Amino acid sequence: MSVGAFILVDVVGDHTRSCQQTLSRIHGVKKVYTVCGDHDLIVRVEVDTLEELRDECLARIRCVEGITKTTTCLEL
Protein backbone atom coordinates (compact mmCIF):
# COMPACT_ATOMS: atom_id res chain seq x y z
CA MET A 1 0.00 0.00 0.00
CA SER A 2 1.42 3.39 -0.94
CA VAL A 3 1.50 6.61 1.06
CA GLY A 4 -0.08 9.65 -0.56
CA ALA A 5 0.19 13.25 0.55
CA PHE A 6 -0.48 16.79 -0.53
CA ILE A 7 2.25 19.23 0.41
CA LEU A 8 1.29 22.90 0.65
CA VAL A 9 4.27 25.04 -0.31
CA ASP A 10 5.02 28.71 0.32
CA VAL A 11 7.51 30.35 -2.04
CA VAL A 12 9.38 33.63 -1.64
CA GLY A 13 9.21 36.30 -4.33
CA ASP A 14 9.04 35.24 -7.96
CA HIS A 15 10.50 31.73 -7.50
CA THR A 16 7.20 29.93 -8.16
CA ARG A 17 7.99 28.76 -11.68
CA SER A 18 11.53 27.60 -10.89
CA CYS A 19 10.33 25.82 -7.74
CA GLN A 20 7.58 24.11 -9.72
CA GLN A 21 10.09 22.84 -12.28
CA THR A 22 12.53 21.62 -9.62
CA LEU A 23 9.81 19.95 -7.55
CA SER A 24 8.43 18.06 -10.55
CA ARG A 25 11.78 16.23 -10.88
CA ILE A 26 11.85 14.92 -7.29
CA HIS A 27 11.25 11.20 -6.76
CA GLY A 28 7.68 10.57 -5.61
CA VAL A 29 6.24 13.84 -6.89
CA LYS A 30 3.30 13.08 -9.17
CA LYS A 31 2.01 16.58 -9.89
CA VAL A 32 2.73 20.19 -8.92
CA TYR A 33 -0.12 22.71 -8.98
CA THR A 34 0.25 26.49 -8.92
CA VAL A 35 -2.56 27.91 -6.78
CA CYS A 36 -3.87 31.22 -5.43
CA GLY A 37 -4.54 31.72 -1.75
CA ASP A 38 -2.56 31.08 1.41
CA HIS A 39 -0.03 28.89 -0.42
CA ASP A 40 1.75 29.14 -3.76
CA LEU A 41 2.05 25.48 -4.79
CA ILE A 42 0.39 22.18 -3.95
CA VAL A 43 2.52 19.10 -4.53
CA ARG A 44 0.91 15.66 -4.93
CA VAL A 45 3.26 12.95 -3.67
CA GLU A 46 3.02 9.16 -3.72
CA VAL A 47 5.70 6.92 -2.19
CA ASP A 48 5.93 3.43 -0.70
CA THR A 49 6.46 4.27 3.00
CA LEU A 50 6.26 7.11 5.51
CA GLU A 51 10.03 6.86 5.91
CA GLU A 52 10.50 7.41 2.18
CA LEU A 53 8.17 10.41 2.35
CA ARG A 54 10.14 11.92 5.23
CA ASP A 55 13.71 10.98 4.33
CA GLU A 56 13.70 11.29 0.56
CA CYS A 57 10.80 13.36 -0.64
CA LEU A 58 10.21 15.98 2.08
CA ALA A 59 13.91 16.43 2.77
CA ARG A 60 14.52 17.27 -0.90
CA ILE A 61 11.46 19.49 -1.21
CA ARG A 62 12.48 21.58 1.80
CA CYS A 63 15.94 22.17 0.31
CA VAL A 64 14.63 23.74 -2.90
CA GLU A 65 15.78 27.35 -3.22
CA GLY A 66 12.88 29.76 -2.79
CA ILE A 67 10.71 27.53 -0.59
CA THR A 68 10.04 29.15 2.78
CA LYS A 69 7.52 26.77 4.35
CA THR A 70 5.79 23.44 3.75
CA THR A 71 2.74 21.81 5.31
CA THR A 72 2.15 18.11 4.70
CA CYS A 73 -1.37 16.65 4.55
CA LEU A 74 -1.42 12.83 4.49
CA GLU A 75 -4.17 11.05 2.59
CA LEU A 76 -6.34 8.81 4.73
Image: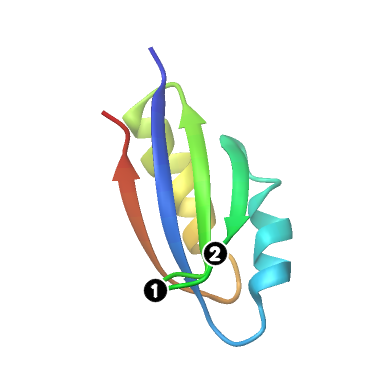
User: Of helix, strand and loop, which one carries label 1?
Assistant: loop
**Residue 45 falls left or right of residue 8:** right
Relative to 57, is 51 above or below? above
User: Of helix, strand and loop, which one carries label 2?
Assistant: loop
**Residue 22 falls left or right of residue 70:** right
Seen as rendered, the residue at the extreme bottom is 13
| Image location of residue 9, percent across then percent down | 46, 64
Report if the CB atoms under discs 2 and 1 are less than 8 Å apart. no
| Quarter that holds the N terminus | top left
**Residue 22 falls left or right of residue 11:** right
Q: Label 2 vs label 1: CA separation?
A: 9 Å
Q: Which residue is drawn at 33% across and 51% down?
A: 72
| Image location of residue 60, percent across then percent down | 53, 53
Q: How many labels does the image show?
A: 2
Relative to 20, is 66 above or below? below
Residue bearing the label numbered 2 = 35
Q: Which mark is residue 38?
A: 1
Q: Which mark is residue 24?
A: none
| Image location of residue 32, percent across then percent down | 61, 50
Q: Which residue is drawn at 73% across and 69% down?
A: 18
- Type of amino acid under label 2: Val
| Quarter that holds the C terminus | top left
- Type of amino acid under label 1: Asp
| Image location of residue 63, percent across then percent down | 53, 64
